[in-house]
Image: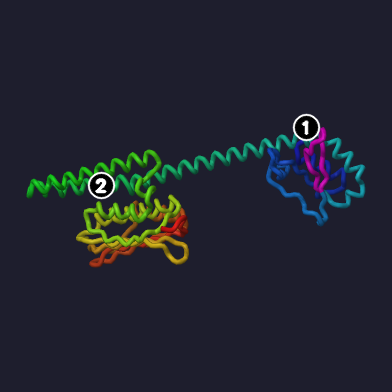
Amino acid sequence: MPDPATLQRAFADAFKDPSIEIAFPAGDGDDGWLDSRAQPVSLPMPGTARRVTDVHNHGAVVAALIHDEGLLRRPELLEAGASMAAVVLDNQRLAAQSEASIRELLLSRARIASSAESERRRIERDLHDGAQQRLVALRIELELAEDVVRQDAERGVARLRELEQELDEALEDLRSLAHGVYPPLLADRGLSDALRSVAMGSSIRVDLDAPRLGRYAPEVESAVYFCVLEALQNVLKHAAGARRVRVRVAAGPLGALHFSVRDDGAGIAGLRPGAGITNMQDRLAAFGGDVAITSTPGVGTHVRGRVPASPLSVA
């Protein structure tokens, strides 16, 4: 059986039309067409110098010949050539459709693999910015509580009980992450309440300005929540002498969600992005957003982020 290119050359020679093309129905209910390489192709629009002649086999359209309109003056030649090649074209149609299906299957597998990798990275970031950060903070708090116990046993016991509650919350975060719903308060009540809970549980004073924002897409809420959480944990770990953090989250005038985390710590000269900052950048960049971080010795560090988003509902 001749290949599509050979058959196309044979048609071109027989009909004296070097521009002749062969197209095949895409199949499976698709109204599109495929060329001889199983790539999508469009038939010429009415009113152009190109014409389309359908090729039938057992009453079904198996191909279309795209040719110069001059061939219409010799319809008997065109019909005879199409009839003789109908069976061959039908086989080539099946081959083209099969190749297109295989290509789509490979593309589908690639998309699935890409989606799985994106999900793996998301879980990795959630673990790093969520449960891991809380556990690191608990470790630091336990070291501080040890000193409290030595100085004042009663006050130390009270602090340890508070840390037990924080540990229970961290474990609940891990359980929620394992079930794909993380964190529960964010999923149920939105950014304002979720950040208020974080602020209340912080060992450093957090002044939160997060008016009721309405609800945004879960992916956007999660990105902003984890960025703020990452910034707060960085304050605890790196902002020497910090006593207060100001957190602000607000809807911008042009369909964007903005957040700001500013501490009054010692600041860092020549701040270099670490894994946490990279995670923030990745989270926001996925939605067309960005983050900027400045740190001034003697003044503190300021994290500002923005993500384009419109509320799904108004508070």
Write down the region rendered in magenta: 52-66
Residue 33: x and y in percent read: 72, 44
Q: Quadrant of the N terminus?
A: top right
Q: Quadrant of the C terminus?
A: bottom left
Residue 237: x and y in percent read: 24, 53
Q: Residue at x 54, y 41 (%)?
A: 110
Residue 80: x and y in percent read: 89, 39
- Viewer-closest of 314 and 105: 314
| Secondary-structure class at tag 1 | loop
Which residue matches tag 1? Answer: 1
Q: Residue at x 42, y 54 (%)?
A: 215
Q: Residue at x 21, y 53 (%)?
A: 203
| Secondary-structure class at tag 2 | helix
- Viewer-closest of 274 and 160: 160
The reply to whether residue 268 is in sight is: no
Q: Quarter-wise, where is residue 34 in the image?
A: top right
The reply to whether residue 89 is in sight is: yes
The crowding category of the residue bearing disc 2, from other C-alpha atoms within 10 Å (few below 14, some 14 to 19, many at least 20), is some
Q: Which mark is residue 142?
A: none
Residue 108: x and y in percent read: 56, 40
Left or right of 9 on screen, residue 290 = left
Q: Residue at x 47, y 65 (%)?
A: 254
Residue type indicated by callout 2? Val
Which residue matches tag 2? Answer: 136
Residue type indicated by callout 1? Met
Gap in angstroms between the C-alphas marked 2 and 1: 69 Å
- Residue 54 covered by magenta stretch: yes
Left or right of 100 on screen, residue 66 = right
